[in-house]
Every structure is written in structure tokens, then in C-alpha cells.
Amino acid sequence: METLRLTVEAGDPESEASRRAIAQAAEILRGGGTVAFPTETVYGLGANALDVAAVEKIFVAKERPSWDPLIVHIGEREMLGTVAAEVSQDANRLMEAFWPGPLTLLLVKHPRIPEIVTAGLERVGVRMPAHPVAQALLRAAEVPVAAPSANRFGRISPTCADHVAEDLEGRIDAILDGGETTHGVESTVVDVREDGCVIYRPGTITLEQLRPVCRGEVRFRTELGEGELAKAAPAPGMGVRHYAPRARLVLVEGAGLGGVELAMMEEVNRLEAAGEVVGAMAPGGFMAALMAMRKKPFDIRGFTMGHNTVHVYHWGSWGNPEELARKLYAGLRWLDAAGVTVIVCPLPAPVGIGLAVRDRLVRASDR
Ligand code: TXA
Ligand code: MG
């Protein structure tokens, strides 16, 4: 299968060429094909959610197990009626606050949504993305679009069109290239209940943002007691190793920036001495420390300094969790491509979007 590359002009989804690309992508979706497209979180691999044969193609292309449900994307609120059978007042309030945006709500599915989409579950994850290209595509497609992240199952989510091509070239009908995504980690998946909200997957919409909008408590699914857990909706896809680079991932923690720097250097030196090809996800502040503490040369993204054994990805500034989120997957992919056998990565503070970054790193690691 040849994968068509359709390009939306940077910064101008309204231009003539951009509109043509979006219209062509929408046509492919309506015709039962698969299209990868940008959202504000990561690239999704879309197919018409009402067409079983089209949705099957997603599972085949990704090599995704059939027990893992897909999120359905809509371009406007009017389309919600074809996807969800009922929407509570509380769910409505969250939509008012966060849609369009990176929030996925678990809602009782409409009978029209085929079982394959929800992996047989009673509820369907629904989201209305804010990205202008996703919005334009969904409106032009005029059907709800089922879309998981556009990577091979278990691998790192894509934040640009080249990442999608790495995993899915030749396996899908088209890639709609709209440049890099905005946030870099996936949407927050939330179940709105009468007694409060339950976060199934931490994501771009933060706990701090949800709290003032949710009536009642906001809890993580992992915090539910056994009795409650038995009654709650299942969370397939949450327990398995996921978001993972090919290299082994070693996570470090330390008190304050200094403590983290020290822990990182110790780990880098130990692994290197053990004969590993080491990669480091180094926040900006670490560069000076790494330089000062290492006697041997190493390479910084793209620059080679002597014979290297340590590859350093310039992650972003430690005090800026939004930047760390945005560059997380690109960094892991870059280090994989450099051929490292192990990646040393510090865990950001569990605040704001830092919580989602930690979640992905822990699930991608051996811990
Ligand atoms: O930001 C995002 O959410 C991206 C973009 C493309 O929208 N999509 C995405 O989809 O991350 P995916 O398939 O990679 O992750 C969806 C996860 C599932 O693995 C599952 O954990 C949860 O969301 N999920 C989806 N539908 C569910 C349902 N009906 N019940 C419980 N969990 C569900
Ligand atoms: Mg995924």
C-alpha cells in the first residue's frame, strides 16, 4: 500500500493548498480509508467510527490487540448525539469547560457505534480536539472518527508526521502533515460520575484544571478501593508496557535540581562502565553539569565530539513542564535512532502536565 503524504501549510490551514489537502483526507475517511492527522496532543490514526471494516484497518496497521478501545473524535457538539446515548449534566459541564480540547470523556455509547470501537465495552471515549487541522478534517469528514495514537502498538506516540511515517508508512492510506503537535502528551481520560470525577489516564488537562470544574472529588482510578473498582468501568490498555522506546529506560529521581543532576550522572557513568551505549534525556540545566562532571567527550544532538558513548538529547528546561511534555516523545525517538541501548531520564515533579509525563515514563520503563 502506498501512503499518500498530504501537507497543510504551516500556520495556514485556510490556504487553498491546505484546504485541498484536508478535503482529500476527508474523502479518504468517508471512503473507508485510514488517515493519520495532527491533534493538539499527538497524531491520531483515524477511520470512520461507524464503519466496522474501516476501524478494523486501524487495528491491523497498528498491530493493536482487539481488547484496547479507541477514542472517537468529533468536530462539533451536534455530532455527539450519534456517538453517545446519554450525557449527564456533569459531563456537560466538563465539555463546556474543556471542549474543544485535550479531554476525553467516557460516555454510554450510542447503539450506532460498533463494538469493535469500544472493545465490547458499554462506554465510549469521546473527545473534540482543538487543533485547527483536526477540526477542519472532522467537519469535512462529516462522520465521527475513531483514532488511537498513530504509532505501532506499545511504541512511542508520534508528535510529527515523520514519526507517523517511521511506524506506519506503507500500512495506512494517508498522512495529513500539519507540523508538530502543541502539547506532546495524550488527552486526559475522565469518567464523570455522580460522586465526582475519576481520571483513567492523566494527560494534558491537569488535575489542577479539573478540580474547580468537577462537582465532588477528583480521584485517579488507581486510588479507588476494591469495592468501587469492581463497580467502575474497566480500564483496558492501562496496565501494559506502553509509550516505550526500543532502548531500556532507566528513571532517576533526586531532591531538587542538584540532586537530580547527581543521580543522573551516577547512573550514566555506571551504565557506561557496564558497556552500554547510553542516552540521556537532559534538561537544559543539566548540560553544564554533564560537561563539568564528565571527563570523556559526549555528543549533543547532532554534534559529535570525539568518540562518544553517551548521546545527550537537549530535552528542555527543568522548570518548564510544558516544554518537557512537548519534547518527550521526540527525545525518546531521537535517542532510539542514535542506537543507544539504555536511556537515562529524570522524572519531573508530579505537578500540572508533569504528572502525565511521569505516568508515560513509568509505563515506558521496566519499573
Ligand atoms: O490525545 C489522545 O487521546 C490521542 C489523540 C489521537 O486523540 N489518542 C490516544 O488514543 O491517545 P490511544 O488509543 O492511544 O489511547 C486510548 C486509551 C486506551 O488505551 C484506553 O486506555 C483509554 O484510552 N480508553 C479509550 N476508550 C476507553 C473506554 N471506552 N473505556 C476505558 N478506557 C478507554
Ligand atoms: Mg496510544
Image (cartoon, rainbow, N blue to C red):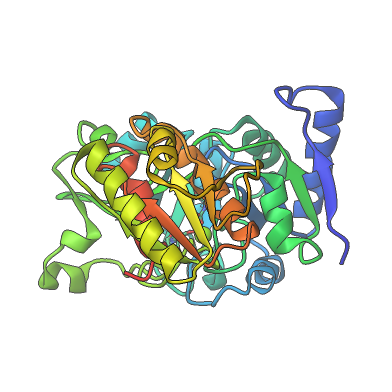
> Is 358 positioned to the left or the right of 329 in the image?
left
Task: Give the camera-side residue of 223 and 73.
Answer: 223
Residue at 68 percent of width and 34 percent of height: 136
Q: Quadrant of residue 18?
A: top right
Residue at 16 percent of width and 60 percent of height: 223
Q: Is residue 156 above or below residue 69?
A: above
Task: Give the camera-side residue of 214 and 40.
Answer: 40
> Is 24 positioned to the left or the right of 340 in the image?
right
Q: Is residue 286 above or below residue 360?
A: above
Residue 95 horizontal/vertical position (percent): 38, 36
Numbered disc total: 0
Residue at 70 percent of width and 39 percent of height: 137
Task: Give the camera-side residue of 281 and 117.
Answer: 281
Residue sitting at the far front = 295
Quadrant housing the N terminus: bottom right
Residue at 81 percent of width and 65 percent of height: 170
Residue 122 horizontal/vertical position (percent): 39, 68
Residue 135 horizontal/vertical position (percent): 62, 35
> Is 166 positioned to the left or the right of 260 in the image?
right
Task: Give the camera-side residue of 152 and 292.
Answer: 292
Residue 118 horizontal/vertical position (percent): 48, 67
> Is 1 positioned to the left or the right of 191 in the image?
right
Residue 97 seen in render = yes
Q: Quadrant of residue 159?
A: top right
Q: Is residue 307 above or below residue 58?
A: above
Quadrant housing the C terminus: bottom left
Residue 49 seen in render = no
Q: Is residue 121 above or below residue 351?
A: below
